[in-house]
Amino acid sequence: MLLRVYGELVYNKRPIAELKRYADSAKAIALKLPNRDNIRKFYFRLGVIHHGKGEFAEALEIYKEGIALVAREGDKNLQAGFYMSMSDIYNKITDYTNAIDVSEKAIKLFSEINDQSGQASIYNNLSSTYIQLKDFTTAYKYATKALPMFEADGLQSRGVGSIKLVIANILLNADEVSLQKIGNAGKNRYLRVIKLMKESIPIAELEKDLGLKSEMLIAKATSFEKLNQLSDATRVYEMAVAVALEGPDLNILAGTYATVGRFFHRQQNNRKGINYLHLALAMATQSGLLEVERETAESLSNYYEHQKQMDSAFYYYKRFSNVENQIFNKEKENEFTRKKLKLDFSIKEKEYAVEQEKVNQQLAEKKLEISFKNKLAWLMGILTIVVITAAWFFYKSKKKTQELNATIEAQRQSLSELVQVKDQIFSILTHDMRSPVNSLISFVYLLENDEIDKDQLAQYAKELGNTLRGTSALMENLLNWAGTQLQGFETSIENVSVKTIVEDVVTSFSATLKQKNIQFNNSISENDWVLADKNLLALVIRNLISNALKFSYTGKAIWLRVENNETEVMVCIVDEGMGMSAEAMEQINKTTINTMTSTYGTNKEKGTGLGLMLCKSFLSMMSGKLSAKSNQPQGCIMAIHFPKINC
């Protein structure tokens, strides 16, 4: 149970010290239990949590500790499982040297315990490695070798679905020369991929593996796109995103966002495409997925260049170039691995017995060398001191490098956020500020040239007043929102009296209430409290009351009340106004935070299009949310939800 709590807290980004208490407690209990399987499986499950979250460095360290433990206790099956999980991580971070090293160790262990399914899983991982290295014929050889081994466990086993997905990726990415060798050239490869995925998707659904299903849908959609069946491709791409969002694997979600984003970009649907690409880039950067980060940064740079936003285009091009250099350098470092991967593993497996004999012979030779090594002991002592000294200097140098990299990463992240906020602010200013300013200029021109009579003056002044009040609200919301984005805004969560905040806010609307003859009914009591930031809550309530007034008819009423249930406290603003469409309510009730489409009020009051986005954004910072529903027979109910305070 402690380990399960730990897993939940990891995904909620709780402090390290708090996480460590749960993990250490779970480990201490597992060590006391007589069944040693508990402590061995503890390391495996703990590693899987970080593995699935994309925290690869943490997962690798946990897997290594687990290997040391199970090796001492002789559990070859779990030791091979650790190595297999590590090979998947090394493939994701393009460290093919270590990927092949742990794969070889896993193959040897699975061979010793005669685990055909385990060997097939390693062949699966090796196929993925060869795909990354563009050696598609070898990748296809290992994939087809693994398929019958998986089918021996059942035609509907997860392994069968997984290896068919690998074969599909080989067919989608292979060059024509490789496809000729495989025997699936031309459009036949896409038809075969669609067939393979139709067979495999039910397996993923049976296993309830959402990550695997999402990757299968991506392969299927890619084939539809290549066959120019764009409606089918769009439908399946969207389905892949929905499935990946439901699954726990953030790495698969990042890759899905990137692939689908590039598709929509190619189809000139830039709004969807760029949104997906931004999400993919953020997740790829966090998880160290270099290939996804490189391709996404390049796509974003091309988009902004086409839009003539050269600052943003140059920024993303620099990110693309930096990641490209990292991958290139890594490829140079792993040149040895490329040569090593040319070895045929089927031959190497037969040579393990010969290699063991060589090891025994080497041990015998080492025994003969012991007397000579004793004479060199004094020299080894000196060498040890030299090595320790060099290691100390290396450690200090590495530590300084890590600190410098952390500083650079913080600056890079800050710059990325600034670019995104700048783009959003300029977009709002461009669309919503130009019209009222032009209207004001035209009005002044008419006054200066005495081209307006008294009746027209009153009419124009009223219309201009509505426009400028909307512009003032836009500026207030825009400045509040931008302040939270640019100034490192931090919330101050405390017990807050809802009644006090509402009374302060309502005072500022007295003129509007009188003008529209709106009756205001406040049934909130002194005992209604919530955990919130009082300033942010005041801004949220002010925006919602402003909207209620805007859409209320003259002579109607507005009610404020608090409702409680077992888990929530809800602050409700109820009006008898013009209400809203089902599409608008659905957009408000979504968990995502987006700008809303502005509509005119009952007296032609102009909205900002930013108020509800601000409300949702601020409420998410206070662990709250916003919902909307119809008020029968007329109007709308806007509800602010907060978790109930436990006394």
Image (cartoon, grey):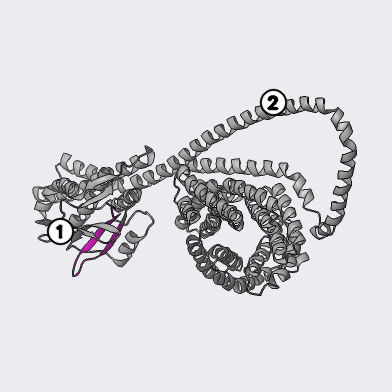
* Three-letter residue code for mark 1: Ile
Mark 2 and mark 1: Cα distance apart in space? 77 Å
Circle 1 sits in a helix, a strand or a loop, which is it?
Answer: strand
| Residue 382 image point, x, y percent | 77, 24
Closest to the observer, 7 or 611: 7
Image side of residue 533 versus residue 158, left or right: left
- Tell me if residue 513 comes above or below residue 487 in the rendering: below
The mark nearer the N terminus, 2 or 1, is: 2
Secondary structure under the numbered disc 2 in the rendered image: helix
Measured as percent of width and height from the top left, residue 259 is found at 56, 58
Q: What residue type is labelled 2?
A: Thr
Q: Name the residue under label 1.
A: 558
Q: Is residue 149 left or right of residue 427?
A: right
Q: What x and y, as percent, mark residue 158?
A: 62, 68
**From the viewer's perspective, is residue 329 above or below residue 620?**
above
In the rendered structure, which segment of residues is drawn in magenta? 626-647
Residue 290's place in the image compared with 167, above or below, is: above
Which label belongs to residue 300?
none
Asked whether 140 or 25 is in front, the reply is: 25
